[in-house]
Image (cartoon, rainbow, N blue to C red):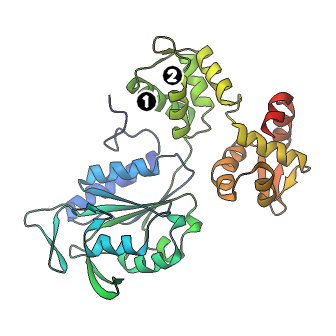
Amino acid sequence: MNWRPQSFEDFIGQSHVTKHLAAEVSASKARDRPVGNCLFYGEPGLGKTQVCEVLAHERGVNLIKLMGTTTTLQSLTSLFVEGRLGNDELPLTGWQRVGNKWSKVPGQKTAPAIILIDEADALPRPLWEVLYYAFEPADKRGRIIKLKYQGQMHDIWVPPVTFVVATNYAGDLPPAIQSRCPITKQFQPYNTDELCQMISQYAQSQGLRLTDEALVMLASRACGIPRTAKQFVDHTCLKAVDGQVTELAAKQTFDLLGIDHEGLDTACRAYLKALHDQGGKASEKTLGVCIGEDPKTIRNVIEPRLIRKGFVTIGAGGRLLTATGRQHITQTDENVVSRLM
């Protein structure tokens, strides 16, 4: 059983995103135009990349993935100049390169490709300046941009591709790029029902059977993140008996992983403990030093979960520990806390 959705109809969660994109795909097919550029933002693990994969499948085009952390000017320009990324040929569906230009394949009515820029906040600003013109709205003919490649300036014919920019915070991107993405969607944490549905489907694909109690426990401790829920399912294999995961097996798995009843891992509890030890108020930089985590991990992974739980708030004075957060950390077993710190 393939648990990865192939259509928007099969996609679990993020309905405010998938319904809009399904309408955009229908309209783009009818007009023989590419889907407008998209900006997807939200916490890691909420399905931004997976939605992009479904978008490409529904539109019937290739998906080209770029990572903001590894993309260089050379790789970016070679993509458009030579139609390749690294050593891999990247045929753009419906288009072919003839000489120095792309031309449409006769009878082909699909858009050429969707280019996903993942972890886009890590892309250097000089590369964004190159992409500004490529992000401009295009018709059937595409657009021409100027790129310097191998010491020479090239007038590059960019086919009418769709750019999808994925990041954790939209504000981390240049305003000029944000304004060039007419489809901007914030991805939301999943509710328990959505997580239960997704976990059941994924567990079945892995040959596991979950009791109702185990299913609810896995969903409730995933903190609304489907990627985390899938990881929990993978770990339950360690305690499953004959492919069945009971509530006891799930609890033993969480004990093994150091996940408490609120779904907090060691890093989250270490953060709360450090904030508690700082008198309930500290800066992000101070907390990062205390627990040995970089600010990006704290801001993108740890704090969103604690804020949703009501354990932490962010104010002008920095990070503040709430009464609920103080109660949670003080009730944590002292032996566990000592191992964390």
> For this view, does 145 lie left or right of residue 225?
left
- Quarter of image, res 192: top right
Frontmost residue, 126 versus 27: 126
Residue lying farthest to the right in this orientation: 279
List x then y, in percent, for residue 32. Answer: 20, 64
Residue located 68% across and 47% down the image: 302
Residue 202 image label: 1
Please tell me whether mark 1 sits on a helix, a strand or a loop.
helix
Residue located 62% across and 38% down the image: 223
- Quarter of image, res 330: top right
Residue lying farthest to the left in this orientation: 106
Task: Look at the picture and state if 266 lies above or below 238.
Answer: below
List x then y, in percent, for residue 53. Answer: 35, 50
Task: Look at the picture and state if 83 lies above or below 238.
Answer: below
> For this view, does 234 lie left or right of residue 7?
right
Q: Nearer the viewer, mark 1 or mark 2?
A: 2
The span from disc 1 to disc 2 (Cα, nearest Å) is: 13 Å
In the rendered image, the quadrant that contains the N terminus is top left
Q: Please tell me how crowded label 2 is: few (under 14), some (14-19), or many (20+) other residues with Cα within 10 Å.
A: many
List x then y, in percent, for residue 81. Answer: 27, 76
Of callouts 1 and 2, the N-terminal one: 1
Q: Which residue is mark 2?
A: 237
- Disc 1 residue type? Tyr
List x then y, in percent, for residue 210. Answer: 50, 18
Q: Please tell me how crowded label 1 is: few (under 14), some (14-19), or many (20+) other residues with Cα within 10 Å.
A: many
> For this view, does 331 lie left or right of residue 221?
right
**Residue 170 in view (yes/no):** yes
- Disc 2 residue type? Cys
Residue located 77% across and 51% down the image: 313
Task: Look at the picture and state if 125 lies above or below 293.
Answer: below
